[in-house]
Image (tube, helix red, strand yellow):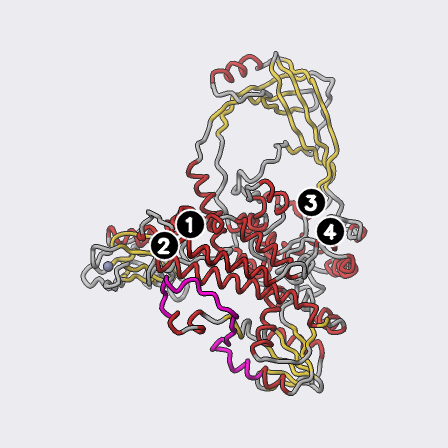
């Protein structure tokens, strides 16, 4: 028999359908030649410190750093039965086919099981980029030798052991030194530099000093066209009076063109999606968090088989994907998307198209595109994400959009004015994305620095003709700080982490380096929220007091490396090299151990004046014991005193309270009016009141509109 191990039951059933002839058994499927069984995600993980030595159960600074000589694996308690079943099936099989997710994490899931169970069977690897029946059948015809992925496993293992060393030791060190049992201060190899990025942006915004200067905008009129111009001057003008005078002078005068150039410009379709780009755009367009987008994309891939592998890092396809893309294009002609295929042409999807086909830029998986299985009955969220992916796919079947760029320099009296016009010649692929342009996102200002062009559908300019200056107005310009990160722009910034590196020498070498992987970025942002290091204010990501303190403290102690993307990006680079066999995992682990030791010695010897209290997100004073503070924890707001049990749960009557609500409760005993939903979905409004007599943290409702009952 041959044992097939899938990552999840769902995947196991898909394989059974593709291969055919299976019967259901207890926890597995069986055919004449195969067993199919599965993991439930991770069945085996790295052991906790207390599994090495009992005394590590107590967090004690003097025990640090904890560096296991050999990392041990332990089974996860909830799934031990499944693990025993895998062992039993393996014992009656002659080989294994590893069918976990085709990526670093999936490889680790299988290898940890294999190693923990001490299996010795030969194994092969199913490596596919979509889960349709065709892709699975094709993949089974092209099974790889398991050893081809040995380096990928080394990279996966190196990643988890380095995260373990930094995370376990850093978190224990900071918590024992500055936190407490109610206030864990977690440190993470990727998490902490990302927090620092959010901190630095926040600092930049709060320290920003806006400057004001002035310019003149004129309206110029030729017989056929009118266009506006902006005063062209070397030094910005800071006196309003100066520009007012210029405006008065040029008003009504004749304008003469002193230089004019025009050139054609092509705008190619934007690249196909990788997960990061999809998360960035879905956040802009629909406000989805990174996690929501990743989850929806996973449903489209796994349950609906409607898109290819979503956790890819590539925005390109290979030449052997093109034939399938042509077939899929034809299928969309008979779908809800048919109107977007009418003027499309398969000739644009060809191996010479470097905007699309770059085999050298594909690591494990090609960019996300729809499969030949067009889904029906999608939820609203699935539809949103699916349509982004389909539309992006279809744009590549169109030519570039064509523009003519006009640059005009005019002189009125003695003053020069410049004009930039972008004239649309043909829409090309933009036929598909027209509606998207109306939905312009106004956040993320400051991230874009392209020169401003006025967009026109036609522009019959004559450079030899004089124009009249019909209007002249002075205009105030204020410099603006950069915007806060959103989840979308943060994902984008993590992908471009190399660009944040200040060291010039490293910068050129590492400009392409990324923080995290598509699979981990989502979790890192969620973690920062969960651990109360950041809050989401509208779409903006802002650091909390605790987040601010941690970054300042690390820099204070000389642990700047933990707050810069540099080190972790370098490590990420090394992990990629380990995955392709060009770097040694042993040398890497020595570097990580050294760094772990450095964290501990910095904390041991370093002094910092930052007090423990600053590590907490204090909301207000405890109303019960009166002398301690209330802090935000994951599911509740509680008193910092170990003797006091005052606590308010974050979820109240189906609504998650904000720290503003809690602060209102602490100061005035009631919140502002909040909208709640009763069980049948009806909305009612009420204020929450804190019971001042019992001080048990229970909240009661005070209805605002007496007519509506719960
Ligand atoms: Zn208290």
Q: Depth check: give the residue in front, 97 or 214.
A: 97
Q: Earlier in the sequence, mark 1 or mark 4?
A: 4
* Mark toward the viewer: 2 or 3: 2
> What range is drawn magenta here?
57-85
Query: Is 63 inside the magenta-drawn segment?
Result: yes
Callouts 2 and 1 close, C-beta under 8 Å: no
Query: On the rendered image, what quadrant is the N terminus found in?
Result: bottom right
Give neighbour class at mark 2: few <14, some 14-19, many 20+ (Cα, 10 Å): few
Q: Which mark is residue 356?
A: 4
Distance between the alpha carbons at the discs numbered 2 and 3: 42 Å
Q: Depth check: give the residue in front, 45 or 362.
A: 45
Q: Image quarter for residue 308? A: bottom right
Query: On the rendered image, what quadrant is the C terminus found in?
Result: bottom left
Q: Earlier in the sequence, mark 2 or mark 1?
A: 1
* Mark toward the viewer: 4 or 2: 4
Q: Which mark is residue 430?
A: 3
* Mark toward the viewer: 2 or 1: 1
Residue 36, percent across and down? 64, 80
* Residue annotated with mark 2: 658
* Residue annotated with mark 1: 554
Distance between the alpha carbons at the discs numbered 1 and 4: 43 Å
Q: Depth check: give the residue in front, 132 or 398.
A: 132
Q: Which mark is residue 63?
A: none
* Mark toward the viewer: 3 or 4: 4
Question: Is 452 placed left or right of 46 in the picture?
Answer: right
Image height of 158 relative to 256, above or below: below
* Mark toward the viewer: 1 or 3: 1
């Amino acid at each position: 028999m041959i044992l097939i191990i899938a990552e999840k039951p769902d995947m196991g059933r898909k394989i059974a359908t593709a291969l055919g002839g299976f019967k259901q058994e207890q926890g597995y499927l069986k055919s004449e030649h195969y067993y199919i069984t599965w993991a439930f995600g991770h069945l085996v993980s790295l052991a906790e410190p207390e599994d090495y030595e009992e005394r590590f159960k107590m967090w004690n600074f003097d025990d640090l750093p904890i560096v296991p000589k050999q990392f041990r694996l332990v089974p996860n308690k909830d799934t031990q039965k499944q693990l025993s079943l895998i062992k039993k099936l393996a014992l009656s099989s002659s080989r294994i086919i590893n069918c976990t997710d085709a990526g670093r994490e999936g490889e680790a899931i299988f290898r940890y099981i294999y190693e923990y169970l001490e299996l010795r069977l030969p194994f092969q690897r199913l490596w596919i980029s979509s889960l349709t029946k065709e892709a699975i059948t094709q993949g089974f015809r092209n099974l790889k030798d398991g050893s081809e992925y040995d380096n990928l496993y080394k990279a996966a293992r190196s990643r988890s052991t380095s995260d373990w060393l930094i995370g376990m030791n850093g978190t224990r060190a900071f918590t024992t030194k500055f936190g407490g049992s109610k206030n864990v201060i977690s440190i993470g190899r990727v998490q902490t530099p990302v927090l620092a990025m959010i901190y630095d942006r926040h600092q930049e915004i709060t320290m920003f000093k806006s400057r004001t200067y002035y310019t003149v905008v004129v309206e110029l009129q030729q017989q056929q066209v009118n266009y506006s111009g902006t005063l062209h001057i070397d030094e910005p003008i800071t006196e309003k009076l100066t520009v007012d005078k210029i405006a008065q002078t040029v008003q009504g005068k004749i304008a003469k063109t002193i230089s004019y150039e025009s050139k054609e410009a092509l705008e190619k379709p934007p690249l196909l999606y990788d997960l990061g780009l999809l998360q960035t755009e879905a956040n802009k367009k629909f406000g989805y968090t990174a996690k929501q987008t990743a989850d929806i994309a996973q449903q489209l891939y796994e349950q609906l088989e409607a898109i290819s592998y979503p956790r890819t890092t590539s925005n390109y396809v290979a030449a052997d994907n093109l034939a399938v893309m042509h077939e899929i294009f034809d299928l969309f002609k008979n779908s809800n998307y048919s109107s977007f295929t009418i003027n499309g042409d398969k000739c644009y999807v060809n191996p010479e198209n470097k905007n699309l086909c770059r085999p050298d830029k594909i690591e494990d998986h090609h960019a996300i595109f729809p499969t030949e299985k067009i889904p029906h009955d999608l939820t609203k969220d699935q539809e949103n994400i699916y349509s982004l992916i389909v539309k992006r796919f279809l744009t590549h079947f169109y030519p570039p959009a064509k523009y003519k760029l006009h640059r005009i320099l005019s002189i009125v009296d003695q003053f020069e004015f410049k004009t930039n016009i972008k004239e649309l010649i043909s829409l090309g692929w933009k036929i598909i994305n027209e509606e998207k342009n109306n939905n312009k996102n106004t956040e993320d200002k400051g991230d874009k620095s392209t020169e401003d062009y006025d967009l026109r559908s036609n522009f019959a300019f004559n450079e030899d003709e004089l124009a009249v200056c019909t209007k002249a107005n002075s205009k105030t310009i204020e410099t603006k700080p950069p915007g806060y990160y959103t989840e979308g722009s943060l994902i984008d910034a993590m992908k471009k982490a190399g660009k944040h590196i200040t060291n010039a020498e490293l910068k050129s070498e590492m400009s392409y380096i990324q923080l995290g992987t598509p699979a981990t970025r989502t979790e890192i942002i969620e973690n920062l929220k969960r651990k109360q290091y950041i809050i989401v204010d509208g779409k903006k990501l802002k650091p909390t007091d605790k987040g601010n303190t941690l970054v300042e403290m690390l820099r204070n102690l000389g642990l700047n490396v933990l707050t810069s993307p540099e080190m972790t990006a370098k490590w990420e680079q090394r992990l990629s090299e380990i995955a392709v066999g060009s770097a040694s995992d042993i040398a890497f682990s020595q570097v990580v151990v050294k760094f772990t030791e450095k964290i501990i010695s910095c904390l041991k010897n370093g002094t910092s004046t930052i007090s423990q209290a600053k590590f907490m997100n204090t909301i207000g004073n405890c109303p019960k014991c009166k002398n301690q503070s209330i802090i935000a924890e994951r599911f509740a707001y509680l008193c910092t005193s170990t003797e006091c049990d005052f606590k308010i749960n974050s979820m109240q009557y189906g609504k998650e309270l904000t720290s503003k609500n809690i602060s209102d409760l602490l100061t005035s005993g009631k919140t502002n009016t909040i909208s709640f939903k009763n069980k049948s979905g009806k909305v009612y409004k009420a204020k929450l009141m804190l019971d001042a007599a019992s001080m048990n943290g229970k909240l009661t409702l005070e209805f605002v509109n007496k007519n509506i009952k719960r």
